[in-house]
Image (spheres, grey):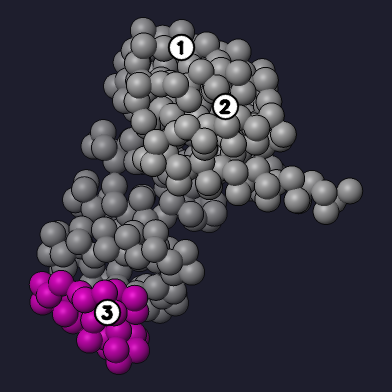
Amino acid sequence: MASTASQPLAAIFEALANGIELTPPQLLALSDLDRDEAAELRRLWPAIDAEIRATLLAGATELTIDDVALHFEELGKVALNDADSAVRALAVGLLWESEDPAVGAVFLSMLDADPDIEVRIAAAAGLRPFVLLREFEQVEGDKGDRIVEGLLAVAADESEPPELRAVAVESLGPRSVEEVAGAIRDAYDHDDPRMQLAAIRAMGSSTDERWLDYVIDRMESPDPDFRIEAAIAAGAIGSEDALDGLALLLEDDEDEVIVAAIEAMGEIGGQEAKRMLEELAEVAPEEVQEAIRSALEAVNEFAQGMGARR
């Protein structure tokens, strides 16, 4: 069968088949593959060494973080059915921005039936954007609902590993239905700290003020991970009622907690947050000054945006 790829791509495919690791410029050529090019890569894929396949996907993921204009969706789809579990997990990560319902369906199948727990965890995380799409009715209701139902089933299943259930809860956060609210409450009350942290993260991604008291309560946790996540969630919810709790976190012993509180104040905005941040700027050590500057910029930009809409 003759290659349908362009001459440069044909050379790249040949290099991969020969076990040669691609340079970054060569890797860029795998962005925006058309249907024929993707079909050719799929045909060659099993012949490529597993380590090379994994390196390829990891490199592509790193490039997308640095440049959001790059699209390796076809590459990720080629790798979703890979025989190697590490490669499948990397493929899910590469597709983290996909809005293709077919990709969501594959992720759901992986969540239900993949034999590797790390792949199932990656799939659970990969389903979060599809939950968000369902919330805003940007995906067909039945397809989105099947994803939500699949995540709810995993979150509620005590026989599943807690680390998988926790990620399922986190991914459910954006969906504003009572079944999800119940799953978040159950996770919050769970004995496993991983589930409790997942509940706080889900509360933040819901942006629903109903969770504000739960979030503020965890700002007083002896565990800095909970204080950090509570601050992040408060920023996402965006209520000024969280400012007093965040103000206490500005005196925390952990710099990471202080930075999370500062960033949350920047997200919440308003005159009170601005006053707190300006007062902090006068006494805070250099390690957090950049965070304060960024937060004040966010507050000012928000205020300008509100003014422009009036």
Q: Judge depth for marks 2 and 3 and give the one in front.
A: 2
Query: Of the residues under marks 1 and 2, which one precedes in the sequence?
Result: 1
Query: Magenta span has 246?
Result: no
Residue identified by numbered label 2: 234
Dot 3 falls on a residue whose secondary structure is helix
* Relative side of 110 to 26, left or right: right
- Dot 2 or dot 3, earlier in sequence: 3
Q: Nearer the viewer, mark 3 or mark 1?
A: 1
**Quarter-of-image position of residue 27:** bottom left
What is the spatial separation of the Cα atoms under label 2 and label 3, in whole angstroms? 43 Å
According to the picture, the residue beneath numbered tag 3 turns out to be 26
Q: Which amino acid does label 1 sit on?
A: Glu
Q: How far separated are the C-alphas under marks 1 and 2? A: 13 Å
Residue at figure coordinates x 20%, y 74% from the top left: 22
Residue 53 x/y as whole percent: 20, 62
Residue at mark 1: 220
Q: In this view, does 134 lie above or below 218?
A: below
Quadrant in the rendering for residue 246: top right
Above or below for 38 versus 154:
below
Tell me which segment is drawn in magenta.
1-29
